[in-house]
């Protein structure tokens, strides 16, 4: 059985999707069960010659510069949406309307209303949806989930998350559409805060309320044309206090202007019997402390991922040899294939991702209201 | 010139004070300038034979089990108060009334009112006071302060602090006076949160407002006599959002129930040109990232403290050989001697420390009021 | 232009080659210049149905269980040899005789004589050869090379290398062909020591002489059929003293029985102005110390690889997001394509790799002769 | 009972000895048993006014600039020798002749013959001797020894040691007596290699033979008077292959010219069930890997020293708060006091230390003979 793939966008995430589609069968064919084989049918970008060149490079059969044609193309069964955030809503609705499955990058949309509309449309049409929370697929992360489920650190009592990068740290960086609410929506919260919330959900379950503050560190930036300075309308950083349905508390810190941090996305989760710590900048490592054995011999243990942390072994049978960022997307793609085959629900689907976006928007709401507690 | 020293308490902090008094001249004599030489005059603890045994061990001339006799003893010019927190207030007031200088462990008192009374009494009587924020004396920390003052990371925009230990992590630990508001006052906030606030002040300056949440992770504990379970009345953990007078934002996370953390007290401070990170569990290291030179060569640099980070060189002329916890107290003691000699103000004095305690109590207030913003 | 690819072997390295061939154009198409496009023509393994299943999974057009047919197949222009070491020699000679380019895993052969024969055959026939020293392709490693060439750490004075894994650490692991000289050849030296020598050559240039010791830690192992214990004929570990043509000295330590080490392959290189440290277990990090600026601000800097370390950016435009093991093989594959296109010499070719094998065998010779100095 | 203490030298090690004598009772009085109480009787240095000033600072009763007077002074029962290495021999012999116990810094002497003479004299006279291998007293190190003795990592199979500093890394550092064989004796081997051998002995037991190479990285240095360049007569670096009596093999690497290393003295010891790693630059940490439990949960554990690692708790009852370099000397001093009291043998005594010096000189011999194997 074949599955026609259409990918919209060829930038950072576009290429990652294309590579994932290209590789998922070759890498994970041995563990996906009975799923369809992807056909790289159609790649969309503008201008057309760029789309054509990259289609050739990535191995797509055809190219187009018309995303509307792509989402309705009969050769396309599933659509990857990897364009700037402001376009996700329109594209996803069109793809769903055409009965296509959708793999959409995060955040789903600029506003919560749009995201809700997308989730509802997908539910109504019965298509499979998946949102690009690739870090959830890291074998180190899923190992943490398994350890916690097995009681390795006891009852969970506190979650502390962080996500920091420095792509907006330089005060001299020119103003761009990223700074505009109407085009980019939220700032650091949408770009990277979403990933952090996906971790919080994945480890702790639902958040019941939050309080937040947020900050535009660089309030204006030089306009690219040299004509003065443009206002930065969205946040560079946010900090959040959380309460979880399981009774635990927590906190999140988020910044796109944190010098030196390149992909710092991690957490520590405190339990009554131990602690687990993870950071994506050392994505093949997981740290655990357990209150077991003699005190003199206790300490944080650094586990290197390997074949005992599935599906690492499909990439490499030798432990500690390390997966990379793009490998996570391949694992994510396999989850989508299995969902389309009906083997297991896609996660996070539009419905799941909507819950993440609710948190992000609640953070912004709380911050705009001077730190009001927002229930979820 | 001699300075008669009386120390009340012989536990963790009592011994540390005794060792500091014993060593300050020998270690730091070469850099303190013209200060008095400490005479280890009187050591107080109960029962008397314990006090006597430890006076002999620590090298004190005399012992007593009567702290009131100590604070009025004519051979005593300065009093170290290292008893449980609930006793600081009474002892400090008595010592001040007797015209003695006071070196008091933190927190100053159980309540803000008591702390204010202590600060006022000291101001009125004109004695020198110092509160035991020894981590501020770490050459790594003061190097961070110097780097920041020199503009090494530009304008400060965010401060993230943490302080975690696990002395109350075990759910089976018996109930003790530490759990009682009337005897211990605040929990983690008083014990270790104070240290973290001293860092926040030392790096960022005044806090203007905060919002907090707090948590008693182990709500009851087994009574030591086996008669059932006692209620834990104070907090195991707290999380805080901060705004600073310099325009920056920040956050604090605090726990005494964080398995695996033994002396994790640190921060990262984000600037417009770089970042500095410190953690007391690796107290001889300081990390700095600077946006300087080619991107391909940027990274976090780990500086090992050495003789170029005064007064490290007075302990050891070889870099990277490492100071220990007790050494910090020796440096603190030197600061007190210099203050008593009039060479420089003591820091943090009762007035400075009162500002720290205001923050701690504001955190508790905010948390008790559902996360209300508390101005400072 | 198309390039017909035949891969022999489908295990650890076979899959890695297959994935590299599959991806090289898609990932690195933008930076390889004018090279041929790989056609996944033929995959060989036994039994045939396994070969067929994996050909389907990996995307090869055809499958065979006859490697001799593969190396002479007209649709095959280049042959990947990824079988157990004892087979490399025969297969490579046959492929070369058929005029095919050869991409062979290391070590080239069981004996130096075989490796020499292979190199000579390739030279005589004029085919392009490349040996699988994928770690040389890590952007962190090539960045180290660039830094050194630019004088970042001055004159090189010492090289210390290590390579440790624990795949033979367990005393209870059953005896296998790996323990047999006639089938496996050298032990740790061949498997992983070769990689370390490739680093030593890549950083320091030629070795002029060496002295070594070596060790079979587990002298016998339980036979798999329970009939007793089999002798381990090759080394578990070796240690080496080196002298380099550039006047520097060095050392190597090598073990396949080092508990806890999973892919520990690294070095520190000392220069007159600084030091560089690398370890493959944190393959996206490079450490450098430079004697520059105030002593108080010196320290080891940890550089995270990113787009400023080519060709990282072709995988991901965001720094610190991390490459994985399989990505290195993709970069290696691109080097082969460029060499086949005549754009640049392949490195390490059979001739280059022969120099690596000479070192490994010299280590074994020295050790067998009680630590005699062996010139190279 | 009192013990009269005389200290010769007031530099790096002189101050450290003085502080140790000053503190040993106060810190470790509770665990030493029935030992004499040190009286800081006499401090020797030149000129006399420096000796007097430092005697006052360190708390010694008297000062002298005549070491011969010190070693025969009736108020002196034990002599600390902390002068440059070339003077140890004469001073130790004189002190022993006067019937004093001797605490001598390492290396014992410039030549093996001198060291042998010292050991023999001490044996003949029956005085207690101790050589300043303070790193052996680190609770992290002794914990490693206990773990190994308890079988935590099985049979020991390999030892890898390193000791690096950068005090002679700068090519522009002026020539000094340190570079002269007749005054300094060996270079890096004597200064720091000795410490590393003390670790090798402490972990593995006796060495049976070795092979070494050595290197003078900076062959000449600018003369301080600007009159040209002086020859460096001793080694900056050495590398060694070891065989141990227990059947294991090992290696040592040693450099005083290793940029960025400040106190890097450590080892990894491989066993059949695990590995232990220690480095003095993080002196309060010990790493252990054990092949226990599920593979998926194995990893290196970082143990922070605390009260469960005696005598840490005498310094501080809270784990992870960290000891410093000077604290190690206090522990060493306690061992000397106990030996003088007859409670346990001093270790390493002159006899033990002589075995260390034999290794160092064997290394130099092997290197000078082109890497000949030297039996021990």
Image: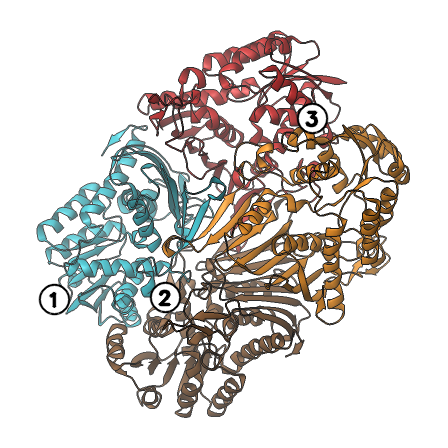
Chain colours: A brown, B orange, C cyan, D red
Please tell me which residue is depicted at 71% across the width and 43% down the height of the picture. Answer: B345
In front here: C97 or B376? Answer: B376
Relative image position of residue A329 (x, y in whole percent): 40, 70
The answer to whether residue B223 is above or below residue C191 is: below
Cα distance between the residues tagged 2 and 3: 60 Å
Which numbered dot is residue C74? 1
Q: Are marks 3 and 1 in contact (CB under 8 Å)?
A: no
The local crowd at label 1, few if under 14, some if 14 to 19, many if 20 or more residues have their Cα within 10 Å, is: few
- Does residue C223 appear in the picture of this structure? no
Residue named by callout 3: D22
Q: Which residue is mark 2?
A: C317
- Determine the residue located farthest toward the left in the rendered image: C124
Q: Chain of mark 3?
A: D
Q: Where residue A108 sits: x, y (%)?
A: 47, 80
Q: Quadrant of the N terminus of chain D?
A: top right
Furthest residue toward front: A227
Q: Residues within 10 Å of mark 3 (few under 14, many from 20)?
A: many
Pointers 2 and 1 in contact (CB under 8 A)?
no
Q: Is residue C92 left or right of residue D351?
A: left
Vertical position of residue D238 compared to residue A113: above or below: above
In-image side of D189 versus C190 (left or right): right
Q: Residues under labels 2 and 1: Cα distance?
A: 39 Å
Q: Do circles 3 and 1 both sit on a common chain?
A: no
Q: Position of residue A183 (x, y in %)?
A: 45, 81
> Residue C365 lies in what quarter of the image?
top left
Relative horizontal placement of residue C43, taking residue B260 as reference (left or right)? left
Image quarter of residue C189:
top left
Q: Quadrant of the C terminus of chain D?
A: top left
Question: Which mark is first along the chain, 1 or 2?
Answer: 1
Question: What is the secondary structure assignment of the residue under circle 1?
Answer: loop
């Amino acid at each position: 059985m074949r599955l026609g793939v259409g990918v919209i966008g060829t930038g950072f995430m576009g290429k990652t999707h294309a590579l994932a589609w290209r590789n998922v069968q070759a890498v994970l064919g041995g563990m996906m069960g009975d799923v369809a084989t992807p056909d790289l049918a159609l790649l969309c970008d503008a201008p057309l010659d760029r789309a054509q060149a990259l289609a050739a490079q990535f191995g797509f059969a055809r190219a187009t510069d018309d995303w509307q044609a792509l989402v309705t193309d009969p050769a396309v069964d599933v659509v990857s949406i990897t364009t700037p955030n402001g376009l996700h809503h329109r594209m996803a609705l069109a793809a769903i309307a055409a009965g296509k499955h959708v793999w959409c990058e995060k955040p789903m949309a600029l506003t919560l209303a749009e995201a809700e509309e997308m989730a509802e449309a997908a539910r109504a049409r019965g298509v499979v949806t998946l949102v690009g929370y690739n870090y959830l697929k890291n074998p180190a992360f899923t190992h943490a989930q398994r350890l916690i489920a097995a009681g390795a650190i006891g009852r969970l009592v506190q979650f502390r998350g962080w996500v920091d990068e420095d792509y907006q740290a330089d005060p001299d960086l020119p103003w761009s559409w990223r700074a505009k609410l109407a085009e980019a929506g939220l700032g650091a919260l949408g770009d990277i805060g979403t990933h952090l919330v996906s971790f919080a959900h994945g480890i702790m379950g639902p958040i019941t309320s939050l309080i937040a503050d947020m900050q535009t560190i660089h309030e204006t930036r030089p306009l690219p044309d040299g004509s003065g300075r443009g206002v930065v309308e969205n946040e560079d950083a946010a900090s959040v206090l959380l309460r979880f349905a399981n009774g635990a508390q927590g906190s999140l810190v988020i910044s796109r202007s944190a010098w030196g941090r390149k992909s710092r996305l991690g957490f520590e989760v405190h339990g009554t019997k131990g602690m687990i710590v993870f950071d994506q900048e050392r994505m093949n490592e997981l740290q655990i402390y357990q209150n077991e054995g003699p005190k003199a011999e206790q300490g944080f243990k650094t586990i290197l991922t390997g074949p005992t942390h599935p599906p690492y072994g499909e990439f490499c049978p030798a432990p500690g040899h390390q997966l990379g960022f793009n490998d996570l997307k391949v694992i994510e793609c396999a989850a989508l294939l299995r969902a389309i085959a009906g083997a297991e629900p896609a996660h996070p689907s539009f419905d799941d991702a909507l819950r993440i976006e609710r948190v992000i928007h609640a953070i912004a709401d709380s911050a705009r209201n001077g730190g009001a507690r927002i229930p979820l």
